Image (cartoon, rainbow, N blue to C red):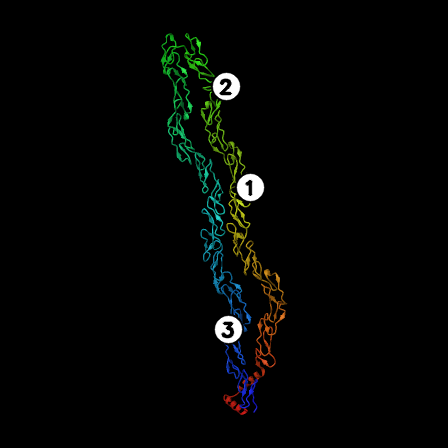
């Protein structure tokens, strides 16, 4: 009998049954192996897992998409997916790739098909589902939701201002303000307390200034020192009042007139030193001593002028005459006929002759001598018996009877002296502080001003004016009698004596009309600015005025990313990872983006920074907006996408391997297998003839009755060889 074996099976010559080749089974070897079986007569079980197909001939596993390995028990390596793990994952920003479909599992902070998009502003976390809760315009971390506080703010939600002594981003910088100064929580710029200035509030107000910013002018006069904080005047000895403009009242002296004089028999004490100014007739440190004999008056400096042994009163200088004398200076002998103390006794001489005015003895009338009283007293003598000696100066003559001095022409006064002069021959000028006849008058000029030794008129020292030179020059004037107008500018103080300008902070020059040169500041421009990065320095306070893009006390801190402008207070609105130029706030776009805020993706055909480069790809082919790499359409490859896929490859950039069998070719675009003659199926793995027979048998099976199987068996047995 003739065997009816198919699909390359051999017929056993003895038994007559078919010996099937690998992959086939059945009496005629016309049935392909069922799923899960392979080999001769499909006796071997496939070892494939994860829905993999098994080659019915060899048992080789044909893995389902996403699996690899001999038994298809290994997932695709990280970064690959799909059939044969041939496709490259396109997930970005640390996302993992699903090994079968290539779907991306985004990490926190990212979204989009390829996890290429950061969470929009105000959202964070997985799938950007978390809502940020930041205040003060702060942005939040797209991954964790942590708030990035702007400078000057801190706390979980940026709701708290920087604590005292801190400033800047996250309040992480220490203020460097001294003497109780506070600092701006954003810039760190010091806000000095009253009485201090400088970048770190390290300097006291310059002399003559006080208050906030050291801008208020002190009003202390007469050498009073101004408190640099309050402006209160600390007066020097001898002065009191709000501005030290008042002399100490009587009985007080010293600093702020705070000490009481310790004097007896005094008029007052010196308001500066407390030295006692004794009443007339007293002397000593505390005015406890009566003037010694022969002196009287103020400080016992006046010499008594009593003659003929008379004594003077220590206070008034009034003479108490000896017997036989009377008159203001006891210069007159008793009138004829009288004698004794106060000339109270009458002479008893015969015939009315005068008597000696001291003892009462009878003598010649004054001015004469001789037995008969016939001789006139010689020059230089006078009085009874010419016993009196004249005490007149050379500028006068002596009366021979009374001894009274009669001034020569051009002279006057008790001793015929010239006003303003003293001495035996009036050759000595009055000492300082004295003037007039015999220099007996005391000058009342103040502030070390001398007086005219003749008239007593005060000659004020520079810086003072008035009858007694006790008024300081009014503001804006200086010199002798305060007649010269000051030429100082910019609120500078003018020295009342010399007119020299005492410049306020930030000014210099003879008239304080020049600002401090660049890099200098403060009083007399002696301090050096420490500003950096082209910052300007305030010529008064030394505080730095930062250029755009910088902040900090010395302008040494660049703007944090996302901020720009003056003191970095302007927030940038750049997107897509663009950086912000700290000076202008202009967005610096990364490759692939353009636009004012870098919000636009490069137009088709352009790529790179600001999209300025042209793609060099074939017609109709786009390029990667970042790198310019051509993104070849299915079926093409190469730098310019002009090369067709090699045999066995297909898809974009020809990145996929064809999975066709039996010498079938593969469509370079879709990967569809183009079968050789005699083969069919998605992979051209099915024999066309076998498929047709199998299909016909299946068709016959569907038409047989239920017991046809046994009939068919019998028929087969009958036809078997």
Question: Could you say where residue 449 lies in the image, as x and y percent from the top left?
Answer: 48, 30
Contact, mark 1 vs mark 3 (Cβ under 8 Å): no
- Compare residues 696 and 719 and report the one nearer the observer: 719
**Label 2 – label 3 distance at C-alpha:** 143 Å
30 over 203 or under it: above or below: below
Is residue 574 left or right of 230 when viewed as pictured? right
Residue at horizontal 53%, vertical 33%?
484
Q: Which numbered disc flags the more N-terminal residue, 1 or 2?
A: 2
Quickly name the residue at label 3: 74
Mark 2: secondary structure: loop
Would you call the spot at circle 1 few (<14 residues within 10 Å), some (14-19), or many (20 or more)?
Answer: some
569 over 366 or under it: above or below: below
Q: In which quadrant of the rendered image does the C terminus lie?
A: bottom right
Foreground label between 2 and 3: 3
Residue 592 in which image quadrant: bottom right
- Compare residues 583 and 64 and report the one nearer the observer: 64
Would you call the spot at circle 2 few (<14 residues within 10 Å), some (14-19), or many (20 or more)?
Answer: few
Q: Is residue 539 visible?
A: no
Mark 3: secondary structure: strand
Is residue 102 left or right of 311 when viewed as pictured? right
**Label 1 – label 2 distance at C-alpha:** 61 Å
**Label 1 – label 3 distance at C-alpha:** 85 Å
| Mark drawn on residue 514 | 1
Mark 1: secondary structure: strand
Q: Which numbered disc flags the more N-terminal residue, 2 or 3?
A: 3
Quickly name the residue at label 2: 410
Q: Is residue 560 visible?
A: yes
690 over 330 or under it: above or below: below
Question: Could you say where residue 655 lies in the image, as x and y percent from the top left?
Answer: 58, 71
Question: Could you say where residue 336 lies in the image, as x and y percent from the top left?
Answer: 39, 12
Q: How many marks?
A: 3
């Amino acid at each position: 009998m003739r065997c009816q074996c198919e699909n390359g099976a051999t017929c056993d010559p003895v038994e007559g049954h078919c010996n099937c080749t690998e992959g086939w089974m059945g009496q005629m070897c016309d049935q392909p192996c069922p799923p899960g079986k392979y080999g001769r007569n499909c006796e071997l079980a496939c070892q494939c897992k994860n829905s993999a197909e098994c080659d019915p001939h060899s048992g080789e596993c044909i893995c389902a998409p996403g699996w690899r390995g001999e038994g298809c028990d290994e997932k695709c390596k990280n970064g690959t997916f799909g059939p044969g793990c041939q496709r490259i994952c396109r997930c970005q920003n640390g996302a993992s790739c699903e090994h079968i479909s290539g779907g991306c599992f985004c990490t926190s902070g990212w979204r989009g098909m390829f996890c290429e998009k950061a969470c929009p502003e105000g959202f964070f976390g997985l799938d950007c589902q978390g809502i940020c809760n930041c205040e003060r315009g702060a942005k939040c971390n797209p991954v964790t939701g942590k708030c990035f506080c702007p400078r000057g703010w801190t706390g979980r939600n940026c709701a708290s201002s920087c604590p005292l002594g801190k400033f800047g981003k996250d309040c992480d910088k220490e203020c460097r303000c001294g003497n109780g100064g506070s600092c701006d929580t954003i810039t760190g710029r010091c806000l000095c307390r009253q009485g201090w200035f400088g970048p770190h509030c390290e300097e006291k107000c310059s002399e003559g200034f006080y208050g906030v910013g050291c801008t208020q002018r002190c009003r202390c006069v007469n050498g009073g020192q101004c408190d640099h904080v309050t402006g209160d005047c600390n007066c020097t000895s001898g002065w009191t009042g709000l501005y030290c403009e008042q002399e100490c009242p009587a009985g007080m002296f010293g600093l702020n007139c705070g000490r009481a004089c310790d004097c007896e028999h005094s008029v007052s004490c010196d308001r500066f030193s407390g030295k006692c100014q004794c009443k007339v007739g007293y002397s000593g440190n505390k005015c406890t001593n009566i003037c010694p004999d022969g002196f009287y008056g103020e400080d016992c400096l006046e010499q008594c002028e009593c003659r003929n042994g008379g004594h003077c009163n220590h206070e008034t200088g009034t003479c108490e005459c000896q017997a036989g004398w009377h008159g203001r200076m006891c210069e007159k002998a008793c009138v004829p006929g009288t004698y004794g103390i106060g000339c109270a006794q009458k002479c008893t001489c015969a015939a009315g002759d005068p008597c000696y005015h001291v003892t009462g003895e009878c003598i010649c009338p004054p001015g004469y001598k001789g037995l008969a009283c016939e001789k006139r007293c010689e020059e230089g003598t006078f009085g009874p018996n010419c016993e009196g000696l004249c005490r007149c100066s050379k500028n006068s003559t002596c009366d021979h009877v009374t001894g009274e001095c009669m001034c020569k022409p051009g002279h006057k006064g008790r001793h015929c002296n010239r006003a303003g002069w003293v001495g035996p021959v009036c050759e000595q000028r009055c000492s300082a502080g004295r003037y007039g006849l015999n220099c007996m008058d005391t000058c009342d000029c103040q502030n070390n001003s001398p007086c005219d030794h003749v008239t007593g008129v005060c000659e004020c020292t520079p810086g003072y004016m008035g009858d007694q030179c006790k008024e300081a020059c009014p503001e804006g004037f200086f010199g002798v009698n305060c007649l010269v107008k000051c030429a100082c500018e910019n609120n500078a103080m003018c020295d009342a004596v010399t007119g020299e300008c005492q410049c306020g902070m930030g000014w210099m020059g003879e008239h304080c009309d020049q600002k401090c040169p660049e890099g200098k500041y403060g009083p007399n421009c002696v301090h050096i600015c420490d500003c950096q990065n082209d910052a300007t320095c305030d010529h008064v306070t030394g505080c730095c005025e930062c250029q755009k893009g910088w902040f900090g006390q010395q302008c040494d801190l660049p703007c944090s990313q996302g901020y720009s402008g003056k003191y970095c207070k302007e927030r940038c609105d750049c997107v897509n990872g663009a950086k912000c130029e700290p000076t202008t706030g202009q967005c610096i776009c990364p490759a692939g983006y353009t636009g004012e805020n870098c919000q636009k993706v490069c137009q088709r055909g352009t790529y790179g920074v600001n999209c300025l480069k042209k793609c060099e790809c074939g017609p109709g082919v786009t390029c990667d907006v970042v790198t310019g790499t051509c993104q070849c359409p299915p079926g093409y490859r190469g730098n310019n996408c002009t090369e067709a896929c090699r045999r066995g490859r297909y898809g974009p950039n020809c990145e996929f391997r064809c999975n066709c069998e039996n010498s079938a070719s593969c469509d370079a675009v879709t990967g569809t297998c183009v079968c050789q003659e005699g083969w069919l199926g998605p992979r051209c793995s099915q024999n066309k003839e076998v498929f047709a027979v199998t299909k016909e048998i299946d068709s016959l099976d569907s038409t047989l009755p239920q017991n046809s199987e046994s009939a068919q068996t019998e028929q087969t047995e009958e036809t078997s060889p």
